[in-house]
């Protein structure tokens, strides 16, 4: 397959696509889908508005020619999408994607489901964890299912022999849990990813005073654990550190304090087929209508080429350069764009 390695206006390549397979979730995390907004009256996407598995594969095949080689399936909660294992199988057998991962809240990940996902070709699972404390979990997410989430982490370790665990850290809410989480998983083959609370969307009541920077976390962790910084990977959103005396590693995603816009190599595809060039985008390009209205692949490819080659997104850097200026731009919700 001929690869046309495309770059944007800042010479950033494209090789990673995050695909939201549903905008629905069975959790109501305060930093993503607060229950006051996403209540029984909230209008979620209808089935016919969603990309079909065949349409997702068509998009993937079309973007492969531009260098796409890594995909992460997200949501909402991706395991709510019926027969998602069929999508994974189609991607792994009908495309040349090298790495296919999935991010889940873990509540629906049984041993049987994990084994099935592994069998059809899934390479990696990331599970979101707020805390090990039931009280804190309920405060952050009233629908939290503590036991199933923890069980899912150990199930993933058993089936995949590795798990990434995402922890969104919020000051005076769950920051006291950092050491408990490290102690709990330090002897497992896991990567504990501490994420700065981000200003994604318009509903999570983001406040910079709730942010604990990765630098501050690292200083605290160093007082208890021997950690060594790993060699940075180009395009990675996290900086990884090895726990020298244990099997696990820790990583830090610092989009607030140390934006990584300059090396961002990823796009995002919403469940209804809109392509976004930034997590903080204000609008997306409708790929769904393009592929439903035209059977010709070059129409999709030409549209994507025009989108990426004119890309100028640097939201997080702009925010940091204008710390005293509040950016009044309506942003897409994380639950819709897929994180």
Image: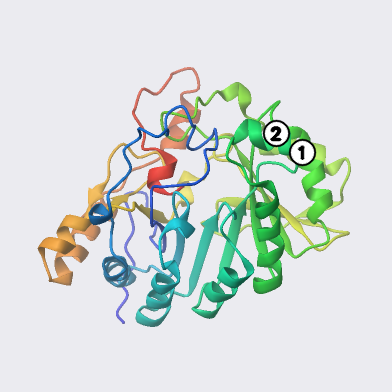
- Residue that appears at 43% across and 72% down: 88
Give the distance between the C-alpha atoms of the residues marked 1 and 2, in whole angstroms: 9 Å
Q: Dot 1, how many residues are within 10 Å of its Cα: few (below 14), some (14-19), or many (20+)?
A: some
Q: Can residue 43 be seen in this snapshot?
A: yes
User: For this rendering, which residue is in front, 226 or 194?
Assistant: 194
Do residues under tags 1 and 2 come within 8 Å of each other at their CB atoms? Answer: yes
* Quarter of the N terminus within the rendering: bottom left
Going from N to C along the chain, the mark reached first, 1 or 2, is: 2
- The label shown at residue 122 is none
Q: Quadrant of residue 116?
A: bottom right
Q: Which colour scheme is used?
A: rainbow
- Residue that appears at 40% across and 34% down: 40
- Residue that appears at 21% across and 65% down: 301
User: For this rendering, which residue is in front, 240 or 271?
Assistant: 271
Residue tagged by mark 1? 177
Helix, strand or loop status at disc 1: helix
Q: Which of marks 1 and 2 is in front?
A: 2
Q: Can residue 231 be seen in this snapshot?
A: no
In this view, 305 is above or below 219: below
User: For this rendering, which residue is in front, 103 or 6?
Assistant: 103
User: For this rendering, which residue is in front, 229 or 122?
Assistant: 122
Position of residue 201 in the picture relative to residue 294 (left or right): right
Q: Where does the image place residue 31, in percent across and percent down from the top left? A: 54, 34
Q: Where does the image place residue 101, in percent across and percent down from the top left? A: 52, 65
Q: Where does the image place residue 189, in percent across and percent down from the top left? A: 75, 65
Position of residue 159 in the picture relative to residue 182 (left or right): left
Residue tagged by mark 2? 136
Helix, strand or loop status at disc 2: helix
Q: Where does the image place residue 102, in percent across and percent down from the top left? A: 51, 62
In this view, which residue lies farthest toward the front? 40
- Residue that appears at 75% across and 39% down: 133
């Amino acid at each position: 397959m001929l690869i046309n390695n495309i770059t944007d206006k800042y010479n950033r390549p494209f090789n990673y696509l995050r695909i939201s397979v549903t905008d629905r979730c069975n959790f109501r995390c305060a930093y993503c889908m607060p229950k006051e907004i996403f209540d029984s009256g909230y209008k979620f996407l209808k089935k016919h508005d969603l990309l079909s598995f065949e349409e997702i594969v068509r998009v993937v095949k079309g973007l492969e020619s531009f260098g796409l080689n890594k995909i992460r399936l997200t949501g909402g909660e991706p395991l709510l999408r019926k027969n998602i294992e069929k999508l994974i199988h189609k991607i792994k057998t009908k495309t040349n994607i090298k790495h296919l991962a999935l991010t889940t809240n873990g509540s629906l990940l049984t041993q049987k489901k994990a084994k099935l996902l592994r069998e059809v070709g899934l390479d990696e699972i990331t599970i979101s964890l707020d805390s090990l404390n039931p009280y804190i979990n309920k405060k952050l997410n009233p629908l939290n299912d503590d036991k199933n989430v923890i069980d899912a982490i150990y199930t993933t370790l058993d089936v995949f022999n590795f798990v990434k665990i995402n922890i969104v850290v919020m000051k005076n809410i769950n920051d006291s849990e950092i050491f408990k989480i490290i102690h709990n998983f330090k002897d497992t083959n896991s990567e504990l990813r501490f994420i700065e609370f981000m200003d994604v969307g318009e509903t999570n009541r983001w406040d910079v005073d709730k942010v604990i920077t990765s630098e501050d976390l690292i200083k605290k962790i160093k007082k208890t654990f021997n950690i060594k910084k790993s060699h940075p990977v180009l395009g990675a959103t996290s900086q990884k550190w090895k726990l020298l005396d244990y099997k696990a590693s820790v990583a830090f995603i610092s989009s607030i304090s140390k934006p990584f816009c300059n090396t961002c190599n990823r796009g995002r595809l919403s469940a209804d087929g809109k392509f976004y060039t930034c997590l903080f985008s204000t609008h997306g390009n409708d790929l769904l209508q393009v592929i439903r209205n035209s059977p010709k692949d070059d129409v999709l490819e030409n549209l994507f080429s025009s989108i990426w080659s004119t890309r100028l997104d640097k939201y997080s850097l702009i925010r940091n350069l204008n710390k005293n200026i509040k950016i009044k731009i309506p942003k897409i919700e994380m639950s819709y764009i897929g994180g």
